[in-house]
Amino acid sequence: MADLPTYEGGCACGAVRYKVIDRPVRTHACHCRWCQRETGSAFAINSMYETDNVKTTSETKPEVVEVPTATGQIQWITRCPRCKIAIWSQYALHAGKAVRIIRAGTFDNPDLFPPEHHIYTSTMQPWLILDESTPQAEEFYDRARFWSQRSLDRLEKALQRAEEPQGGQ
């Protein structure tokens, strides 16, 4: 098996750095009101990774902030303790702690992974015009319909690993 590619990124001040293994499971642009509020922008670009494929490489450890979401479920936002830039999130509703949603703008090269899908377009800014060749969903998307088999398999394996007992539990 060939070595998988790695990509690096970090916060604005450079205190928190990370490395990811492989390309994202999926990258989407989220237009929900919560992502608009959290980013101060029209949408967030999120790259999904298996939690065990994301490694913090800096001595400075990120902080985790728990916030609600539009569904009422919990979201854990991982931020730099100095500059407070959000680096990734984990959502209780969508795969829980098995998956980390990397803020694509924090990659050293944020151009690498353009959105493969636009979600929550029902609340996108009315002045925004999307490329019609990129799939869109008014709410969340149907994974079975839009994801590749490889992406579905990666998510399933991540969910299985997350259910395994940890450290003698």
Image: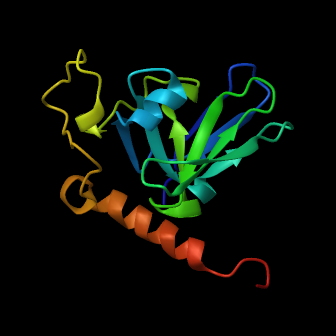
Lateral position of residue 87 relative to residue 152, left or right: right
Instruction: Inspect this view and state whether residue 45 appears.
Output: no
Considering only vertical position in the picture, is 89 above or below 85? below
Q: Nearer the viewer, residue 101 or 26?
A: 101
Which quadrant of the figure has residue 17? top right
Q: Nearer the viewer, residue 36 or 114?
A: 36
Lateral position of residue 162 relative to residue 121, left or right: right
Q: Residue at x 49, y 28 (%)?
A: 37
The residue furthest left is 132
Q: Residue at x 58, y 71 (%)?
A: 162
Instruction: Inspect this view and state whether residue 167 appears.
Output: yes
Q: Residue at x 79, y 84 (%)?
A: 168
Where in the figure is residue 1, as x and y percent of width and height? Answer: 48, 60
Quarter of the figure that contains the C terminus? bottom right
Lateral position of residue 139 relative to residue 78, left or right: left
Where in the figure is residue 97, as x and y percent of width and height? Answer: 59, 61
Q: Residue at x 86, y 38 (%)?
A: 59
Where in the figure is residue 155, as x and y percent of width and height? Answer: 42, 63
Numbered disc total: 0
Considering only vertical position in the picture, is 93 above or below 70? below
Q: Nearer the viewer, residue 51 or 62?
A: 62
